[in-house]
Amino acid sequence: MLPLKIENLAVSFPGLTTPVLAIETLDIAAGSRVALTGDSGSGKSTLINIIAGLERVRSGRVHWGADNIADFSEGRRDRWRAANIGLVMQDFHLFPGLSALDNILLPALLSRVANADLVQRAQTLLSTVGLKRPEQHIETMSRGEMQRVAIARALLRQPGVIIADEPTASLDLESGEAVGDLLLSVAADAGSTLIIATHDPRLIERLDRRLSLRSGRITGDTDTKDIAA
Amino acid sequence: MIGFILADLRRLWLGGAVVVLLVALATALGVAVTLQERSLRLGSARAADKFDLVVGAAGSETQLVLSSIFLQPAPLPLVDGSVLTKLAADPRVDWAAPVGFGDSFAGYPIIGTTTKLVANTTTGFAEGKMFALEGEAVLGAAVDLPLGAEIKPMHGTAETGGHTHAGPAYKVTGKLQPTGTPWDRAILVPIQAVWHVHGLGEDHGHHDDDEDAHEGEHHEGDGHDHAHDGEDHHEDGDAHAEGQADHARTVAEKPAPQSQKYAFALGAASSAHVEEDHHGRIDPDAPIVETFGPSTPGLPAILVKPKTIADAYRLRQEYRTGSTLGVFPGEVLTRLYATLGDAKMVLSAVAAGSQGLVAAALVLVTVIHVGQRRRQIGALRAFGAPRASVFTIVWLELFLLVALGIGIGFLLGLGAAQIGAQLFTAKSGVILPVGFTREDMRLALIFLGFAAILAAVPALLAYRQSPATALRA
């Protein structure tokens, strides 16, 4: 439930004359559901990395609520991200050899914040995302099930923001739709801000707002709320 | 975190096993060298422990010690028998005992000596009793023969073309408790029996003692008989002497046995023809006599127990002149260890080199491995794992593998050293005490410390990796 405010953001890579991402100003209201679209190379992933605190901001300000994550040290960004951002990736990034439950708890365990409540919450989340066997090892799951586990993991610490990077791109139509439903419903339940980078038109049209990127700049900003509702 | 590491290691078990194996082998090499060398040093020192001073004929000190204490078969020059007489009478000497060797039975060396030496260098009998007659024998603990067994001495050893003395046979009367020395593999018989088998000392030896007057006659008879035995021995390739000639020579030499400078030569085939010259017979029922007169035959070595340390030094000094050689076995061993130490240094350097190679290979493998795991490491970070956790995971994974390898390596090294020690004991009778000491503890800690630093290299790479770059990769 955090609002995002970006000012004068510019991301450049050495050797490139033009910045890969340049955003003068961008506001995303708390609790809103935003689709991020654009071809590959449009700066979409870079924007995701920046707002998720995965990459350092060298120029400009990125405010999530009262915090400007551009000022954070790497360690602080890690801690902040762990507490505030739920990430869902195209490739799930689950860890083979561990059960669904352990995968959900792993980041919390590694941050030494796991407690009985969180374990309980992980169990609840598993049934929320529609999985019945918490001890099932993830390598024995279908891709749709894996993405459900990944979503449960993203939700564990009740993040104010859920960021998903092409969550349905590696799934078949049916699973993709189910995952889209799930993301929308869990974000709605928690009131989290939801930002999804996607090409999936059916997912896009179910979100409130659509941001289009091209060559590192926002070229379109449409309100699709009426349709989604 | 441990759960994650274990899951990870299970997934990568094959690579992990190879790492463990590499480390284990490299460690085992170094550990085995250290343990083996140390046990050899300790074991041989213990074997020499009971023998304060060894007196022999002028020659190689090392050979004297190797032959008298480690019973290593080699031709030794003989020291004049009168030396023993003198030593036995010396007030500074607690006891002095002759050691005569040259024969063997079933691979066990037959050592001629005295009851005094047996009593003073062993802890007692496991069964049976001390030899009391010329034809009796006492077994070392490692000799696999029963009480009452009959022992037919063979000159030299079977491997070196020795042959069996036809006449004499000893009867086993006792078995000693283990001493952990090469003497455990020895068959101990009265020294006079050894002399008599080889046709020495019959006319002289104990004849000074009036009680033994009739013995001499008895042996005289034996001496004449033995030429016929000579016939039996001609299977020897280099037996150049016919029975008659043989006999003649034996008789001729008998009055001056000390001229036989290399008679008691165990194992040297070339000595066989020398041996041809003096077959003898023992009288199994003759009582043994352990006072040695001036005409005692020549001896390869005399073991001396001085009364005090000062006496020991004085005696050694006295018997280091002219035709005799007095040595402290400990001193000779120390010199041998110095040589051994050099060999150990070379081996240790080889071991250290291989360990260095393995370490370098491990760094290479793990750096590549971390590269391959960029995505996984990045994902861990992206989902909120702190950098310290990522560092710990990578560090702990490698450290666990290497530590396991070091642990297994120490056990392997211990096992190898023990097998080596057992082989050595079976061959020589010297018990090598293989075991870890504080020094090894230090080595283990150094290895572990090194492993900790080694594991930090990939861990640091993982630590420095940005989560975003990792995900892009």
Image (cartoon, helix red, strand yellow):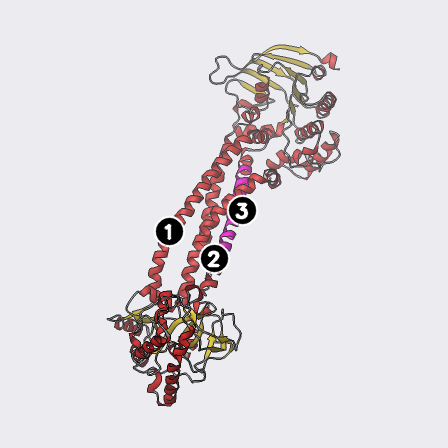
Of the residues tagged 1 and 2, which is closer to the observer?
2
Q: Nearer the viewer, residue B188 or A18?
A: B188
Q: Is residue B92 visible?
A: no
Quadrant of the rendered structure where residue A178 is? top right
Label 2: chain?
A: B
Q: Amino acid at mark 1?
A: Met
Quadrant of the rendered structure where residue B85 is? bottom left
Label 1: chain?
A: B
Task: Say which element carries label 2.
Answer: helix
Left or right of B300 in this view: B383: right
Q: Give a yes or no on whether discs 2 and 3 share a subunit.
A: yes
Of the residues tagged 3 and 1, which is closer to the observer?
1
Q: Is residue B399 magenta?
A: yes
Label 3: chain?
A: B
| On-image quarter of the N terminus of chain B | top right
Q: Which residue is mark 2?
A: B420
Q: Which residue is mark 1?
A: B345
